[in-house]
Image (cartoon, rainbow, N blue to C red):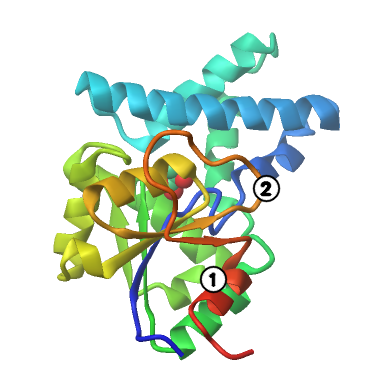
Amino acid sequence: VSDPEVLAFDLYGTLVDPIGISTTLTRLTNPVTALELARLWRQRQLEYSFRVTAMERYQDFRWVTARALEDALAVMAIDLDVAAQSELVAAYDHLTPFPDVEEGLTRLAAAGHRLTVLSNGSPAMIANSLTNSGLDAYIDLQISADEISAFKPAPLVYLHASTRIGRPIGEIRMVSSNPFDVIGSKSAGMRTAWVDRAGGVFDSIGQQPDLLVNGLDGLCRALDIPT
Ligand code: LAC
């Protein structure tokens, strides 16, 4: 068993599934289009978070999520009134955890690792998501990028996490499925684990992840936690 670590988990895409919102979107359209809309919504959400940070025009992640939905709907020519759009944004607080997450967090906690969340979500979004999914029981600290009004992968966000956690940045491992988050945290000085849930391609800029795993079960194996 390896020494206990401080793990900072990304939320969306790593612990809970933002693309799973497509089942809610089937209210509006057929399943294939709903999946396409869910993916476009997520892609625009990330792009907008990068843009407002680069522009130094911070708005919180719920605002970014709402604007991204508005944009994705327009691109796909789906007409939806403001009230219905607000309902969809609210559904972001009820995303489903990936199947490996609960057991993985249980085993990581039992092995003595400290489990935190570092997310671009606003504090309320993070708290709601963790409470509604039951994952809050495993997480001892919730850290939001909102606390410093900039989004990952800005280095200040990771430095802020180090301050909140009270440990040097090099002693914290960012666990994320999002390649931008893995290269960003590494660039700021963290250790990293890339949770490659989709069998995807890693970014071609930045350093390779220190650990490459396919889920939290894989992370447990990589940290030598016995089954
Ligand atoms: C997060 C998004 C970026 O939870 O996945 O920070």
Q: Residue at x 45, y 31 (%)?
A: 46
The CB of the residue at mark 2 lies under 8 Å from ligand 1? no
Vertical relation: 34 (above or below) 140: above
Give the label on residue 158, or none. none
Q: Position of residue 89 (x, y in %)?
A: 53, 35
Q: Residue at x 63, y 17 (%)?
A: 73
Q: Position of residue 74 (x, y in %)?
A: 61, 10
| Count of numbered circles on the image | 2
Q: Residue at x 60, y 35 (%)?
A: 88
Comparing 196 with 129, the one in front is 196
Image quadrant of ligand 1? Answer: top left
Tag 1's secondary structure? helix
The part of the image, by quadrant, that contains residue 136 is: bottom left
Give the side of residue 16 with respect to residue 159, left or right: right
The CB of the residue at mark 1 lies under 8 Å from ligand 1? no
Q: Position of residue 127 (x, y in %)?
A: 40, 59
Determine which residue is flagged by label 2: 198
Q: Residue at x 58, y 52 (%)?
A: 94
Tag 2's secondary structure? loop
The part of the image, by quadrant, that contains residue 101 is: bottom right
Residue 121: tell me if it is visible. Answer: no
> How would you rate the neighbour count of disc 1 (Cα within 10 Å): few for under 14, some for 14-19, many for 20 or more?
many
Determine which residue is flagged by label 1: 219
Earlier in the chain: of badge 1 and badge 2, it is 2
Give the side of residue 36 with respect to residue 215, left or right: right
Comparing 142 with 24, the one in front is 142
Q: Amino acid at mark 2?
A: Ala
